[in-house]
Amino acid sequence: MQDCARYVEEMTRLRREIHRRPEEGWTEFETQWKVFRALEALGWTIRVGLDVIRPEAVMGRNAELVEKAMVRAAEHGVPESFLKATGGYTGLTADFDTGREGPVTGFRFDMDCVLVEELHDASHLPAAEGFDSEISGHMHACGHDAHTATGVTLAHWITDHKDELKGRLRLIFQPAEEGTRGAAPMAAAGVVDDLNWFFGAHVGCNCRIGEASVVKKGFLATTKIDIEFTGVPSHAGSDPEKGRSALMAAAVMMQGIPRHGEGDTRIAVGRLVAGEGRNVTPVHAFMQCETRGSTQEINEYMFESVRRIVEGCAASYGVECRVTKAGEATNFEATPAACALAVEACAEVFGRDHVTCLETAGGSEDCSILARRAIEHGAEATFLFYGCNHHGHHRADFEIQDTQSLPAALAVLSGICRRTNGL
């Protein structure tokens, strides 16, 4: 921990810069540029955009939002040459070769924000200290700004300690974790295929300051779903029989899907927008929902049930429908070697009594796709949490106590590096 104290100011400053300029998934060009510039100065080998993204595996990317984000990024100092080099895709990997034989170890950090309006009140630390969000309706309310800053600072630590390390280190800066959209196209591009070790980490969740958890197995597999209904308009008063209501078709009872006997299931409808006017039969309806399951197979059962219900409702109301996967994540079982090593690194920082092992991790995390692929290609892999005293993720008052939680994260990750790649 003492070895990481010298990086606290640098890490905190970067985290707060990123917090002030939050960017949603697939639009993180300002954040990507900050990462690129810092790692280039450290001499790392960097790949960006389409070099680390497989476009055909991309989900939930809005080209219009991406274009606007690139314009905004240029207005805020991101060079046009860099934006062009990305090919319009965020995502970055950085490699450091020690020049000595040894394993290849990868760490993943996410960069995107949440679509939440931040609390602009003196009771909220970012507002009180002047680094609250400048972009309306966008906030780093899940800690990805902390993850990114920790990743960049880990690169600095590795560079400073290169004479104590062997093998190669890879840092993966992933876009679009929210909505579980960014891991799959990076996995498809092969960014974890040659790794011997792989680790992901997240601030907060079940851990308070001074605590850590290592995931043995868990996370719910999930599919994020966009559903569009298209009906036929008519005058709701004089010609109701001539219309076909997209809104009525969208009022489907998905909660009635029979639960699966072999594991947990979830179904949630988070958004429904429909209709054109009070006296017009609704022509358009748009719904955003998600399924989850304790295994990939159970989640697929839930997704196919949603598809079947939507298509049946569309047919019964005489409207057209389209079901699109907008994001996806899976479950995975960590490897014993990675779990044991992560527990050791966490215990060194927090003390063994403050480190737990999770047999089931609630929620979903698209790092699971990268972890599962890494394991399938022969790597040892796990995921861990380190603490902060937060009020709840995805809330307007989310806080992480960055001067305490970030140094602890760096101490854990650098401790992992010493164990996997130390001389």
Image (tube, grey):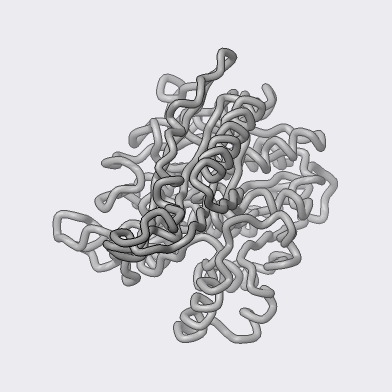
Where residue 138 sits: x, y (%)?
A: 36, 63
Q: Nearer the viewer, residue 300 or 68?
A: 300
Quick one: which residue is furthest to the right in this view?
A: 101
- Vertical side of 40 occupied by 219: above or below: above
Viewed as shown, does residue 322 lie left or right of 145?
Answer: right
Where residue 202 sits: x, y (%)?
A: 48, 42
Image point (52%, 67%), residue name: 28
Q: Residue 33 sits in which quadrant?
A: bottom right
Where residue 40 sits: x, y (%)?
A: 65, 71
Image point (51%, 84%), residue name: 74
- Vertical side of 371 occupied by 17: above or below: below
Image point (69%, 65%), residue name: 44
Q: Nearer the viewer, residue 395 or 334?
A: 395
- Vertical side of 33 occupied by 275: above or below: above
Q: Is residue 138 visible?
A: no
Q: Nearer the viewer, residue 353 or 295?
A: 295
Give the total of numbered labels.
0
Viewed as shown, does residue 141 lie left or right of 356?
Answer: left
Image point (57%, 53%), residue name: 320
Quick one: which residue is furthest to the top in this view?
A: 261
Q: Quadrant of the C terminus?
A: top right
Q: Is residue 144 visible?
A: yes
Q: Residue 312 sits in which quadrant?
A: top right
Where residue 419 sits: x, y (%)?
A: 66, 35
